Image: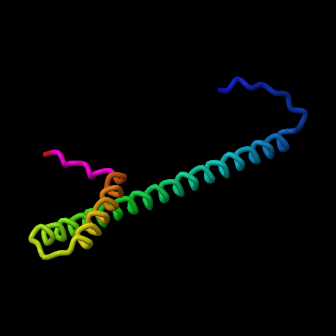
Amino acid sequence: MFGIKFRCRCDTDELQAKLDQIAASIHNLKGAIMATKDEVLADLTAIATTVSKIGTETSASLAKIAELEALIAAGGVSQDIADKVAEIKASITAVDDLVADAPTPTP
């Protein structure tokens, strides 16, 4: 199959033992590769969950900022509070820009 030719100066039992050892090594490598794949999948799932959480929290913060801006627009809020709200909005908007928007569902 692989075009490998070799000469063996050993008896059949020795050859079988060597083949069994190679098969066991291949089996162990396959297990290690599968474990690594599962670990990577678990890490990616955790990252996706964290990104989703960040998006949700950022959206909630932006909603609160909108409420504060409505209060400011209604009047009666000092300029230093209005400035602080604007500063916080800029920070939250910067975070929001870093997080990808959720895909729009297709009908």
State whether the magenta stretch is mostly helix, strand or loop. loop
Q: Residue 55's quadrant in the figure?
A: bottom left
> Which segment is the magenta one?
100-106
Percent position of residue 69, x then y = 17, 67
Judged from this view, the residue extending furthest toward the left is 74
- Say if 13 sits above or below 93 in the image: above
Whether residue 47 appears in magenta in the rendering, the answer is no
Q: Which of 58 and 19 is in front in this view?
A: 58
Q: In this view, does 95 lie to the left or right of 82?
A: right
Quarter holding the N terminus is top right
Q: Looking at the picture, how far across and down is residue 53, in whole percent?
A: 34, 64
Residue at point 87%, 38% (across, down): 11
Nearest to the observer: residue 48 or residue 88 = 88
Q: Quadrant of residue 10?
A: top right
Percent position (x, y) of residue 37? 53, 51
Quick check: 20 above or below 95?
A: above
Q: Does the magenta stretch include residue 105?
A: yes
Left or right? Give the position of 73 relative to 29: left
Residue 49: image location, x then y, percent:
38, 62
Relative height, residue 39 to residue 6 (above, below): below
Relative placement, left or right, of 62 versus 7 is left
